[in-house]
Structure formats: structure tokens, C-alpha cells
């Protein structure tokens, strides 16, 4: 009983501190930052942030007291240290996110520091959430609940039905997070929030519909006898490739119709990479559902995983419990990390650092390549129960098409812009265009041809196997496609090389 009382009091204190902090932050966001008296404001922040941190930390401590868990010393250490730093980093991440992305007239130096603090605190927040979870992991019941039930059931992948699933909450949270990031980038560009509201409200449901359509087509054998079941989306069955495809197409069409006067190419370069963020968060829905995992592996080789992930990965929604000492490969965890990396590569490397070498639209098309490649290698690693289509090749085929299509679109984009700029006499060769384009062409040619040759040899020396796996034949297919895509990039470097050679030729009097 004492633990329950401490839990209730602590959570009220935490919510009170957080509520005041949010009110204070909203008032800061609405007022010009240059007019704020920081000497008066900062102590208020510190006091109520401290109240929130103490309240939330005590909430975590009260959970084992409430449940009468007998915990080892290292578990208490993980719980207290993890809870304390989760609370601290949580409030820092939340406040810096709001101030950086929605504050008005923030001094440039302060805004830069807010971004740096956010980029440090946000990843650390997840590290300490896992430290916190390690303190309680051995006392939880597995598989973990996968939703919220209003009927008294305990919803888990092993049985029970949730009225609100964590899978749906993960997808929705990821979409909202991606929207907030894209909205801020539009604010930086155009000085106005809310430009993407209607696009988000149209593209998000379109993505869900597209994900369902691709799943139904790829697994038509499940619905052939009862086609009405294709509309039972609550039973599960979504394909992210289809969701991304239809969501992007409908979103772009809607934006062009409703937001005339804005650059559609700048818009897609801002919006499309954030889909990777949404997918990174959404993949955790697979964790709660114990699905879309890999094959059985030795658990000892995965001890680096957070304990709660390791323990929950012992169960499969289709195969049941793994044998002792084994787990199902948590592909959701790997893909989540790869998607986060992809967002930063596309947005910050190609979208900023290498912007002078890219055309508007390249970053969006790069999403097709990145996510296509991710799925090219992830699909064969899945448990066969989660592969789609005949012999599991449906999603794998579309993953390869994403890679090839993204490459073609980038080459076409550069070709179109080169022709357009020449027509309007705005075409300018970059510095050292001759050497850089020649080097790019040589590298692309050597790597592309090498991959094609190796791929052809692998396919020629091995028979086609009727299963989706990284066997020699399928590896050959991957190398052939990637080699062909690399050769396609010669369509960017070779025309530039020709232009550089022509520019270096001395002009005669007749030419003048």
C-alpha cells in the first residue's frame, strides 16, 4: 500500500511540474526571445524542472515497492540512475525541442546551442530509458502487453485483445514527430508554421491505405476465399513500402494543388526524408507485437541488447516461445537504427553539407534508394512467416525497384536541370569539373562493372532457390541491380565531363 501511495503522489508531482514547464515554455514561444529576462526565467525553469525530475524518478522507484519485487543491488542502481537521467534528459529534450523548433526570433547563437543540446540529450535519453528498463526487466511478464484494453483483458501477442494497440500509437507518434520536424524546416524557409497541415492529414491516411493495398496484393491467397477481410485492417497486415509509395504520391499531388507558390522540389526534399523518422518510431510497434523478426539465434551473441528487448524477443506471435538460450533476431531494432541514420545522412549530409553537388529533389529520391537498400537486406533475414507474396519475393522485388527507381529519378533530375539551365543560360560548371567528373565516372564504371560481373557469375554458378534468403543466387541479383544502378550514375558525370572538355577548348575567331 505504501508503494501505491508513493506512486500516486509522485506522478501527481511530476505532472504538476511538467504542466507548469509547458505553460512557461508556451509563453516563451509566443513572446520575442530578445525581450525575455533570462535571469528571472531560468530559476523558474530550474525549480519546476527539478520538481518534475524528482516526481518522475520517485514514480519509477515506487513501482517495485508497489509490486513487492525483491530486487538485487544492481537492479536498484539501474532503476535509480536510469530513472534520474531519464527524467533529466526527458525534460531537456522536450524543452529544447519546443524552443528550437517553435521559438520565435531566437538569437542565432542560442538557437545553435539549443540544437546541439537536443542532438546530445535525445539519443542519451534512449540510452538511459534502456538502463531504467534493465532495472525492472527481470520482474516483468513476457511477452509484454501490446496495447490498452477497456474490457479487463490483458492484451499480449500471446492472447487478449487491445482496444488501443501500441502498434497504432507507435505509427501515429512517428508520423506526428516527422510532421513537427518538417513543419519547422518549412518555418525556417518560409517564416510560417502550419503550411503542411492539410498535406499531413491527407498523406498519412493515404499511406495507411497504400500499406494495406500492397499487403493485400502481396498476400492475396489470404483473402481469395473471403475478399471482405481485406478491409479488416484491425487484424493487422501493412506493407511500409506500399505506404511510403502511395503516401508520397498523394502527398505531393495534394501539396501541389493546395500550396501554389511554394517549391514542390524543396518541399519533397524536406518532407520525404522525415518518413524515415516516422518509420524508425513506427517499427517499435513490431516490438510490442513480437512480429516481423528474424530467425532463431543464440541469445549470448545479443547480450548487448537492452534486457527488456532481449526477453521480449524470446517470443514470436506466430512461432511461440524460442528454445532455451535462443531469441528471434529483433530486426525492428536494427531497422529503426538504420532509418535514423538514413534521415541524418539524407537531411544533413546530402541536404546540407553536399547541397552544392545535388539538385532539388535528389534528397527525396535518395529516400527511395536508402529505404529500398534497407529492405533489400532485411527481407531475406526475416522469419519466413513474415515474408510476403509467393515464396516471399513480393516485398523484396519492390525493394529492388525502389533502389533502381530512385537512381533513375536522380539521373533524370540532373539531366532535366542541366538542359533547363543551358536553355536559360544559367548553367555553370563547378570548380575542377573536369577532374572531379572524370574521377566520378571512372569509379562508377569500375565498381558498377565489377558488381555486375560478380553478380552474373554468382547467378550462373548457382540455381534459383524458391525462398527469400541471402543465398548465392539472390546475392547475385542484388549485385547485378546495384551494379546497374551505379552505372546509371554515369548519366550525371559523363555529360559534365563532356561540358568540361568543351569549356577547356580554346575558341577560334569564327567561334567568337
Image: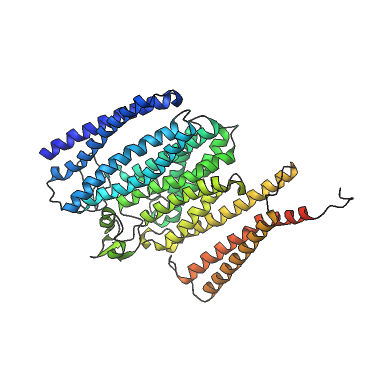
Is residue 232 in view from this perspective?
no
| Residue drawn where x is 42% and y is 24% of the image | 30
Say how many tags the image has.
0
Q: Please say which color scheme the image uses.
A: rainbow
**Residue lying farthest bottom?**
461
The answer to whether 196 is drawn above or below residue 405 in the figure is above
In percent of width and height, residue 93 lies at 36, 39
Between 144 and 306, the residue placed more toward the observer is 306
Q: Residue 301 sits in which quadrant?
A: bottom left
**Residue lying farthest left?**
1
- Residue 469 left/right relative to 442: left
**Residue lying farthest right?**
510
The answer to whether 174 is drawn above or below residue 462 in the figure is above
- Residue 109 left/right relative to 154: right
In percent of width and height, residue 401 lies at 53, 56
The answer to whether 245 is drawn above or below residue 150 in the figure is below
Which quadrant would the N terminus be assigned to in this image? top left
Is residue 302 in view from this perspective?
yes
| Residue drawn where x is 26% and y is 46% of the image | 82
- Residue 472 left/right relative to 59: right
Q: Residue 67 sits in which quadrant?
A: top left
In percent of width and height, residue 113 lies at 43, 38
In percent of width and height, residue 296 lies at 31, 64
The answer to whether 152 is drawn above or below residue 371 in the figure is above
**Residue lying farthest front?**
39
Amino acid at each position: 500500500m505504501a508503494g501505491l501511495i508513493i506512486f500516486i503522489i509522485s506522478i501527481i508531482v511530476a505532472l504538476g511540474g511538467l504542466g507548469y514547464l509547458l505553460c512557461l515554455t508556451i509563453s516563451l514561444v509566443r513572446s520575442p526571445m530578445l525581450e525575455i529576462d533570462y535571469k528571472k526565467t531560468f530559476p523558474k525553469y530550474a525549480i519546476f524542472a527539478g520538481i518534475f525530475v524528482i516526481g518522475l524518478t520517485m514514480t519509477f522507484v515506487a513501482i517495485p515497492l508497489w509490486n513487492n519485487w525483491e530486487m538485487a543491488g544492481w537492479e536498484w542502481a539501474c532503476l535509480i540512475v536510469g530513472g534520474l537521467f531519464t527524467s533529466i534528459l526527458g525534460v531537456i529534450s522536450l524543452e529544447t525541442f519546443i524552443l528550437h523548433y517553435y521559438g520565435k526570433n531566437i538569437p542565432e547563437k542560442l538557437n545553435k546551442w539549443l540544437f546541439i543540446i537536443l542532438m546530445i540529450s535525445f539519443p542519451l535519453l534512449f540510452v538511459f530509458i534502456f538502463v531504467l528498463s534493465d532495472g525492472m526487466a527481470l520482474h516483468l511478464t513476457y511477452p509484454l502487453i501490446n496495447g490498452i484494453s477497456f474490457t479487463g483483458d490483458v492484451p499480449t501477442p500471446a492472447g487478449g485483445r487491445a482496444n488501443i494497440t501500441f502498434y497504432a500509437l507507435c505509427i501515429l507518434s512517428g508520423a506526428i514527430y516527422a510532421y513537427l520536424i518538417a513543419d519547422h524546416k518549412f518555418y525556417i524557409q518560409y517564416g510560417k508554421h502550419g503550411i503542411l497541415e492539410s498535406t499531413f492529414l491527407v498523406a498519412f491516411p493515404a499511406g495507411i491505405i497504400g500499406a494495406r493495398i500492397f499487403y493485400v496484393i502481396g498476400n492475396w491467397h489470404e483473402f481469395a476465399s473471403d475478399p471482405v477481410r481485406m478491409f479488416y485492417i484491425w487484424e493487422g497486415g501493412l506493407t511500409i513500402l506500399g505506404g511510403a509509395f502511395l503516401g508520397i504520391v498523394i502527398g505531393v499531388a495534394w501539396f501541389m494543388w493546395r500550396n501554389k507558390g511554394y517549391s514542390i522540389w524543396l518541399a519533397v526534399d524536406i518532407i520525404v526524408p522525415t518518413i524515415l523518422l516516422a518509420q524508425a518510431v513506427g517499427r517499435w510497434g513490431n516490438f510490442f507485437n513480437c512480429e516481423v523478426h528474424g530467425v532463431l539465434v543464440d541469445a549470448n551473441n545479443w547480450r548487448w541488447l537492452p534486457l527488456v528487448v532481449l526477453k521480449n524477443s524470446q517470443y514470436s506471435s506466430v512461432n511461440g516461445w524460442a528454445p532455451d538460450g535462443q531469441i528471434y533476431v529483433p530486426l525492428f531494432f536494427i531497422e529503426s537504427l538504420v532509418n535514423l541514420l538514413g534521415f541524418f545522412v539524407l537531411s544533413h549530409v546530402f541536404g546540407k553539407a553536399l547541397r552544392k553537388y545535388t539538385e532539388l529533389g535528389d534528397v527525396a529520391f535518395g529516400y527511395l534508394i536508402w529505404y529500398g537498400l534497407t529492405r533489400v537486406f532485411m527481407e531475406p533475414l526475416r522469419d519466413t512467416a513474415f515474408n510476403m507474396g509467393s515464396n516471399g519475393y513480393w516485398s523484396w522485388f519492390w525493394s529492388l525497384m525502389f533502389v533502381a527507381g530512385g537512381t533513375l529519378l536522380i539521373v533524370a533530375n540532373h539531366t532535366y536541370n542541366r538542359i533547363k539551365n543551358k536553355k536559360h543560360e544559367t548553367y555553370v560548371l563547378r570548380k575542377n569539373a573536369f577532374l572531379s567528373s572524370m574521377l566520378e565516372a571512372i569509379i562508377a564504371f569500375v565498381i558498377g562493372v565489377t558488381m555486375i560481373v560478380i553478380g552474373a557469375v554468382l547467378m550462373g554458378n548457382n540455381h534459383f532457390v524458391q525462398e527469400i534468403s541471402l543465398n548465392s543466387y539472390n546475392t547475385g541479383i542484388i549485385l547485378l541491380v546495384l551494379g546497374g544502378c551505379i552505372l546509371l550514375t554515369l548519366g550525371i558525370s559523363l555529360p559534365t565531363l563532356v561540358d568540361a572538355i568543351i569549356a577547356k577548348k580554346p575558341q577560334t575567331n569564327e567561334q567568337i
